[in-house]
Image (tube, rainbow, N blue to C red):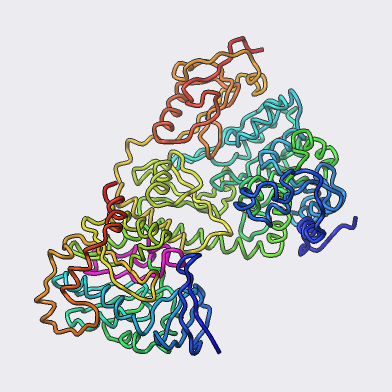
Amino acid sequence: MERLQDQHRAPIYEALERFRQMRVVPFDVPGHKHGRGNPELTAFLGERCMGVDVNSMKPLDNLCHPVSVIRQAEELAADAFGAAHAFLMVGGTTGSVQSMVLAACKRGDEIILPRNVHRSVINALVLCGAVPVYVNPEVDQKLGISLGMCREQVKRAIREHPRAVAVLVNNPTYYGVCSDLRAIVKMAHEAGMLCLADEAHGTHFYFGEHLPVSAMAAGADMSAVSMHKSGGSLTQSSLLLTGPDMPAGHVRQIINLTQTTSASYLLMSSLDISRRNLALRGRTVFRRVMEMADYAREEINAIGGYNAFGKELTNGDSVFDFDATKLSVHTRDVGLAGIEVYDILRDEYDIQIEFGDIGNILAYLSMGDRPQELERLVSALADIRRRYQKDSSGLLRQEYIPPDVVTSPQVAFYADKKSIPLAESAGQVGCEFVMCYPPGIPILAPGERITPQILSYIEYAREKGCSLTGPEDPEIRHINVMTGGVL
Amino acid sequence: MDLWFSEFHTPDVQHSIRVNRHLYSGKSDYQQIDVFETPEFGRVLTLDGNVMLTERDEFIYDEMITHVPMAVHPNARDILVIGAGDGGVVRELTRYEQIRRIDLVEMDPQVIEVCRTYLPENASRLDDGRVNIRYQNALRFIRRCSGEYDLIIVDSTDPFGPSAGLFTREFYASCCNALKSDGIMVNQQGSPFYRQDADAMQRSHKRIVSTFPISRVYQAHIPTYAAGYWLFGFASKQYHPIDDLNAEKWLALGLKTKYYTTRLHVGSFYLPAFLEEILEEVEHE
């Protein structure tokens, strides 16, 4: 099939529209048969939606082995993102991250990564058995947030672990902080390693002005891109991008190890249409988002007490660049933990923000926002300050706790283990994650030594109302620890 | 020719007015604006297809949202009006000599322009020297005010359109902060009759109750609004809407009205049982 060049095209969407016109009689799955068999669901989601919830077939191609419209859609996406190849993904960016890691390493390989990675990265290490080499991210003491990786620390990790196969970089972090990606790509490549980027929060980097460099532009080998976050596609749809030196056929095989064989056309068409929108209008869209974020920062900082931080954090190294579309606000000086502000906003003002942690909140701004809703957010924050402001001295500073990695996540996850009370687990090696979700960055990952400092942090987060996840015990009062020795 | 304007009061209830001429139709940055000339209601202003006012029955709304608080507050001099781009509320306010300042915050300049042209009777007092018009988002404007006003009148559109932000806790809290220590806020509170309207009314009442020490609801009959039955909220830091009504003083002003009387003032706070129940449900939470 011909390679399309025109970003106005959306081949999957076009094929689905043609398919709709053909009025094909379905004697294949899904069993709801264009919604007829499930009238309640159809009444809820709509006939148009149910009518294109269909299975792979010749006119619609097949995501496991794309040869026609899906292939064209992937080629258009690759062009739009400046990648050698783009894979449409339907298992979330978790799927993209796992496939990326699985394509880069195998059992026993070392991979260099910052500790503030998303759980999906370490989950991938549980699957493949690679061993993490953590680069401790810098921490902004005042804000209590993990920053990017310093060049010098990456260099040292590469020197100390010359057999590592890849370096993984958050581009950006949840808060919008970027490391010096170009420099890290260069260091990795000079050492014969791949450079992988987690761009779950960086889709817009490919379509904006005054935004940090994207992974593909920086020369990275692979990138996991959450189209459903800033890209506007449906939840669970994502992209995996690869550079010119990655063998596309092999990456496809890796993806097919874990991805569904019944990929949703709702998700794929949403990727196709969203890619078209970004390619055609992305620059205008993100300029507007940036203006709204700048305006909101200015207004929030005018309230007093709050610190809506932005580009001023940049320091040429651990904050090489900052994504100014992110609206993060430090709340500690108002006397409230971020998670408390997060709860108050939802319970008393009907405003749902992305997350609150110990010291900060993050309000996610996107192409769907309008100035009038921003006014509500700012006014609510002003009212919260009037009503709740108190002395902040009782609040814990959020600190980065360097992990003590005893064994690989896979070894720990599958080891002989027993469940003991979390409170009595200091000194043991944990087999489970503990994290607040969101943001889903592990406080403790499998294979790490549990320390009193980690336990008091977990209790503080619990007390403030953070949603803790990870362990088998839904109450997070017990944790599985290794019983045998560690090889 | 048989031309009708119709508005859905619920998905299953439609209210129609025969139209002689469609005088104006335009789209502003915020909403669709139309003016019709009708045999029964005179000129009718609609925003996004919802009737905002008609020449025939606007006096009920404008008098009830203005004179009720003005007859309670002993000396209201600094007034903030939010929305109300048609000028009807301002027209009523300018009849009080004691008032020295009326700030009008309207987000959509086009509404004011259209009303000046097509509803000159309503807009006639917008040029009064005491009136300052600010074209701004009301939430943004009021965030910066503290202890400045004796009375705030919130004359918004319904809670489902561009005015949604004026039915929120953050807005009422900002109003409370913008009022002097004995200030009053009056707002249009929607209709309690149809389910969706009643729910929205209950939610906003809940938010006002949790913000102001005194919060009462009063009613009026307005033929062109949903169910012909409309509510206003009276929220106050100090004055009670009935106990602090100074009827003699207000009557001494000699203002001629078509709907409002000081007897009706008291009566309008006596509500039907079903409505008392809806309000009490959130007052005791």
Identity of the residue drawn at 44% across and 79% down:
B109
**Residue at far top of view:** A484
* Horizontal relation, residue A265 to residue A409: left or right: right
Quadrant for the N terminus of chain B, please. Answer: bottom right
* Horizontal relation, residue B33 to residue B174: left or right: right
User: Picture coordinates of residue A109 (x, y %)?
Assistant: 74, 26
Identity of the residue drawn at 57% across and 56% down:
A366
Is residue B150 on the magenta stretch?
A: yes
User: Picture coordinates of residue B165 (x, y %)?
Assistant: 41, 62
User: Picture coordinates of residue B263 (x, y %)?
Assistant: 16, 73
Identity of the residue drawn at 19% across and 71% down:
B265
Identity of the residue drawn at 24% across and 67% down:
B148
Q: Is residue A330 above or below residue B95?
A: above
Viewer-closest of B264 and A152? B264
The magenta stretch spans which residues?
B139-167
Q: Is residue B247 above or below residue A97?
A: below
Q: In this rendering, does residue A274 appear at all?
A: yes
Viewer-closest of A441 and B46? B46
Q: Is residue A314 above or below residue A416?
A: below
Is residue A363 on the magenta stretch?
A: no
* Horizontal relation, residue A318 to residue A6: left or right: left
